[in-house]
Amino acid sequence: MRNAYLKSSVCLAGAALLLQLVGCIAVPALMVGGTAMGTLVATDRRTPGAVIEDRGIETKSAFRIREAFGNAVHVNVSSYNRTVLITGEVPDEKHKAQIEKIVRDVENVQKTLSEVAIMDNTPTTAHISDGILSSRVRAALIDEKTLIANAFKITTERGVVYVQGRATAREIALMTEIVSGMSGVTRVVRLLDVLTEEDLSGMLPAPPSLPK
């Protein structure tokens, strides 16, 4: 729904609940994280062009990494405003450097942020838990009526919640308080563009004109 995951092992887990929560597409050992594929452009703080390019970056990165490494790695790629977060697990520094280069070379990528760990791939059950936790985080942000939940893009890896987006200092502080207090969250990593309240006001749609 808000998240497009490219991961065959998660899909093979097959639970209807998982399909509902994380939107599986069968591509081995790879996931495209975040909320971009379900973005509501009306409330997204990126331009429509950036939203489309972010989707393309995620899809191209996922397939190029899969073609290069198959099931040897577990990697998540999440692009927001052409800045790409890379998370997951790889066996060594060589794989990590190669994956980072693959993503950097994708069209329209402006910056990469690598949080890839050198370790054995986590099991499918861990991926399922991370997907469910991401969905719970999004639901909690939606429930907070003073926030625009779609301003934040969520990726979860081994209980660490990565938050991309564009928000004011007030919104970021409230989001952090909500997410850090949730069960299952081990850490919150904020990768956000900070807006002023004036910036935010300029993004809001003009109120409808009253009929004469």
Image (tube, rainbow, N blue to C red):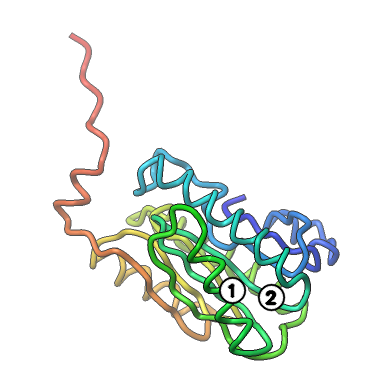
Label 1 or label 2, whichever lies nearer to me, is: 1
Which callout, 1 or 2, points at the residue further toward the start of the chain?
Answer: 2
Q: Is residue 70 above or below residue 97?
A: above
> Where does the C terminus fall, quadrant-wise?
top left
Image quadrant where residue 116 sits: bottom right
Tally of marks: 2
Left or right of residue 153, residue 11 in this image: right
Residue 69 visible, this angle: yes
Q: Is residue 73 above or below residue 168?
A: below
Q: Residue furthest top?
A: 212
Q: Residues within 10 Å of mark 2 (few under 14, many from 20)?
A: many
Q: Looking at the image, which residue is at 35% across and 43% down?
A: 47
Residue 184 visible, this angle: no
Q: What secondary structure is found at the residue carrying circle 1?
A: helix
Q: Which mark is residue 37?
A: none
The one nearer the camera, 187 or 102, is 102
Q: Position of residue 35 (x, y in %)?
A: 53, 55
Q: Which residue is mark 1?
A: 99
Q: Confirm or deny contact between disc 1 and disc 2 (CB under 8 A).
A: no
Q: What secondary structure is found at the residue carrying circle 2?
A: strand
Q: Is residue 162 above or below residue 106?
A: below
Task: Residue type at mark 2: give it.
Answer: His
Q: Looking at the image, which residue is at 23% across and 67% down?
A: 169
Q: Looking at the image, which residue is at 74% across and 54% down?
A: 25
Q: Position of residue 190 (x, y in %)?
A: 38, 74
Give the alpha-carbon distance from disc 1 to disc 2, as whole Å: 11 Å
Q: Which residue is mark 2?
A: 74
Task: Residue type at mark 1: give it.
Answer: Ile
Q: Position of residue 146 (x, y in %)?
A: 32, 56
